Image: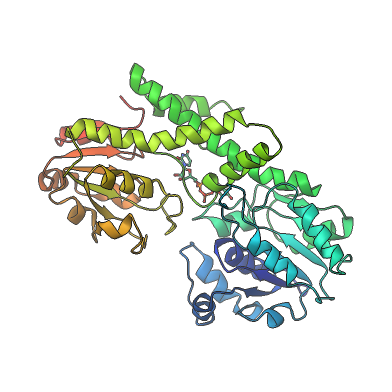
Amino acid sequence: MVGKPGRRVTVFGAGYIGLVTGACLAELGHRVVVRDINADRIQLLRGGGVPIHEPGLGELITKNKERLSFTLDLREALDGAEVVYVCVDTPPSASGDADLSRVWTVVDSLTGAAHLRAVVMKSTVPVGTGTRVRAVLDGAGLAHLGYASNPEFTAEGKAVHDFLHPDRVVVGTSDETTAQLMRELHEGVDGPVVVMDVKSAEMVKLASNALLATKISFINEIATLCENTGADVEEVARAVGLDHRLGSHFLRAGIGWGGSCFPKDSEALRQLANNTGYHLQLLSAVIEVNNLQKRRAIQKLAEALGTLAGARVVLLGLTFKPGTDDMRESPSTVLASRLLAEGAQVHCWDPLARPGDVQPWASTIRHPTPLEALEGADAAIVVTEWPQLKEVDWARAAAAMRRPVLFDGRNLLDPQAMRALGFTYMSVGRP
Ligand code: UDX
């Protein structure tokens, strides 16, 4: 994309964030090596495969293959590198704090890489991590290295677009040389680079995700109140969202938020506050509302069916949102576990998810099409708003089900039309 030769960048981690970051930096003209410790993943990438489903990513990797390579080898990864991006995962630890062990492994491996100019932290980390990384780098004789916190705000399913056309690129650093290097690395990106101190940048990521999760839990609570009063949450959200001070995004009521970021980051922020002796009351309620939202769906089905014991219940959609194969913290996992615990048989359909044979999925039956899954079922739950579900022949589905009971957890279908087809139809916050 840029005319001049780019920087030599090493990305640690070939997951969602690392691959998108690597491919997009290559697209911007930089020479990128992505390093991972998973041999299968690297082999697949070297053979032209893409281990995750992310629209546009495969094309971008192919288009930029001259400037993008993949390796398991640490020495090869760091050879000639000027900038290191840390894109490893930071899963919750037993205490609920983020587990930074993978981050430390990367930082420790940088000793001796004298030609490096900067380390960029893209992994989501607790506020204060930058200060600790700085101390480790200084102690390892790498005081000349710049450090930047550069949180990602990409949403799965549109990660490539979000990287190249962001609302903002947040850069937290204490020195102008690194700030300038980051501006240079992002030349060609269609969005402003906002520079601030490291701790504030670390906080922006956690605060942004917590506020988005808050909007969803808020509208989900209003949806419950709509059900109790006869109002329609879709109408309410539409009009509330027209107030430019509030905005229309993240006001879709549903079965609750999931994914790789919101659950993990909201819990990490809560624990971060707890560690400072402060209890984030609002955020705790936001998390609680989200947990309840999934359980309420099961409760509604139990009421409609009389009992869930022995009932055949279908989960339509398993991923935490459409357009991805990601099932991390998906509401479907909680629903499947709860249904099995109540003695139901769980059948499911999803166009992309590969749940594997771990529980609860090992005890479920998967089908290639929604109609096949619905055959003989006592009830179904729309968990993910896959567009394919709009195209289902619902008249045939009603005839094929033993009892046509449907809980539409994403308000995807038209209540009147579904009831006209004979469904006992329930949704979220709609009369
Ligand atoms: C999110 C943030 O958007 C992104 O900036 C951050 O970097 C990572 O977390 P992602 O997890 O990919 O991205 O998905 P997103 O589209 O934001 O949806 C998150 C969850 O909220 C999904 O489960 C979705 O179904 C749910 N959601 C979203 C709602 O229930 N209602 C809404 O109005 C919006």
Q: 400 above or below 178?
A: above
Q: Residue at x 51, y 75 (%)?
A: 41
The residue at the far front in this view is: 94
Q: 61 above or below 261?
A: below
Give the x, y percent position of residue 352.
36, 61
Residue sitting nearer the eye, 258 or 371: 258
Give the x, y percent position of residue 395.
15, 44
Q: Residue at x 77, y 46 (%)?
A: 199
The residue at the far top in this view is: 229
Residue sitting nearer the eye, 25 or 13: 13
- Check the picture and name the quadrant holding the N terminus: bottom right
Q: Horizontal placement of 413 versus 323: left or right? A: left
Task: Answer with the quarter of the image where residue 24 lies.
Answer: bottom right
Whether residue 332 can be seen here: yes
Q: 361 above or below 309?
A: below
Colouring rule applied to residues: rainbow
- Check the picture and name the quadrant holding the C terminus: top left
Give the x, y percent position of residue 233.
40, 26
Q: 212 above or below 222?
A: below
- Number of numbered markers: 0
Q: Horizontal placement of 78 versus 44: left or right? A: right
Task: Answer with the quarter of the image where residue 339 lies.
Answer: top left
Residue sitting nearer the eye, 338 or 30: 338
Q: Horizontal placement of 309 versus 387: left or right? A: left
Whether residue 87 can be seen here: no
Q: Residue at x 86, y 65 (%)?
A: 139
Residue sitting nearer the eye, 129 or 167: 129
Give the x, y percent position of residue 332.
36, 48
Q: Horizontal placement of 186 versus 162: left or right? A: right
